[in-house]
Amino acid sequence: MKVDSISKEQIDNEITLYNNRIQELYSDVKKWLANYSDLLQCNEIGITRREEMSGDYQTKKLTILSGEDKVVELIPGGIWIIAAYGRLDLVGKSGSEVIVYLREGGPHTQVTISGMSSPITSDYESIKEGWHWIDNRLAGEAQELTEKLFISLIEKVN
């Protein structure tokens, strides 16, 4: 998509939608971590992101703390993502994991290889709309982000 092919109003709508989706996820994360409130605290911090398509926009990252120590952060990675409708990075001391927002049915991709009788298509039909973890070790398999998975990812990157 060319930058001049989308209106300022459409860009603003996408930013608002992205921020609403982020806030819904942060709300879920806070609920998921409520059982650990004696150990973990959540802190939202306003940040400015810059993307070629939209320029600068305001959003928030979520920092999860244990006392004064940062455990992990959910950092907005961008709105304009190939095959997704937004990205967050879960960043800890030991690494990071990619979380993307997918629409129902997931991304629709098709690859044609010379000499093959039919194209290779992605099989994401069972994907529900929402935030998903992309496991890059399993050829980009998308798993719906749940409380159990989120806790496991915190342990993985920390």
Image (spheres, rainbow, N blue to C red):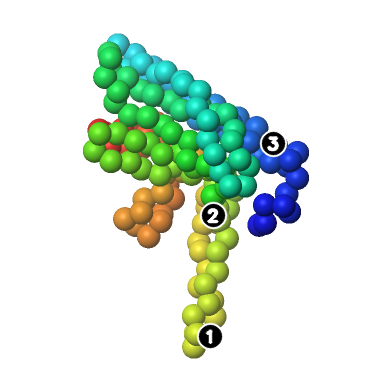
Of the residues tagged 1 and 2, which is closer to the observer? 2
Question: Is residue 131 at all visible to an observer of this figure?
Answer: yes
- Residue bearing the label numbered 1: 117
Task: Measuring from the top left, give residue 92's x and y in whole percent.
Answer: 29, 34
Label 2 vs 3, first from the N-terminus: 3
**SS at mark 1 in the image:** loop
- Residue bearing the label numbered 2: 82
Q: Residue at x 50, y 27 (%)?
A: 47
Query: Real-space Cα distance between discs 3 and 1?
Result: 43 Å
Query: Real-space Cα distance between discs 2 and 3?
Result: 19 Å
**SS at mark 3 in the image:** helix
* Residue 65, placed above or below residue 157: above
Q: Amino acid at mark 3?
A: Asp
Q: Amino acid at mark 1?
A: Ser
Of the residues tagged 3 and 1, which is closer to the observer? 3
Task: Measuring from the top left, give residue 104's x and y in whole percent.
Answer: 59, 48
Tell me whether the residue at label 3 lies in contact with that at label 1, contact meaning CB atoms closer than 8 angstroms: no
Dividing the image into 4 quarters, which one contains the C terminus?
top left
- Residue bearing the label numbered 3: 12
Q: Amino acid at mark 2?
A: Ile
Task: Measuring from the top left, give residue 94's x and y in whole percent.
Answer: 24, 38
Task: Measuring from the top left, give residue 25's x and y in whole percent.
Answer: 50, 30
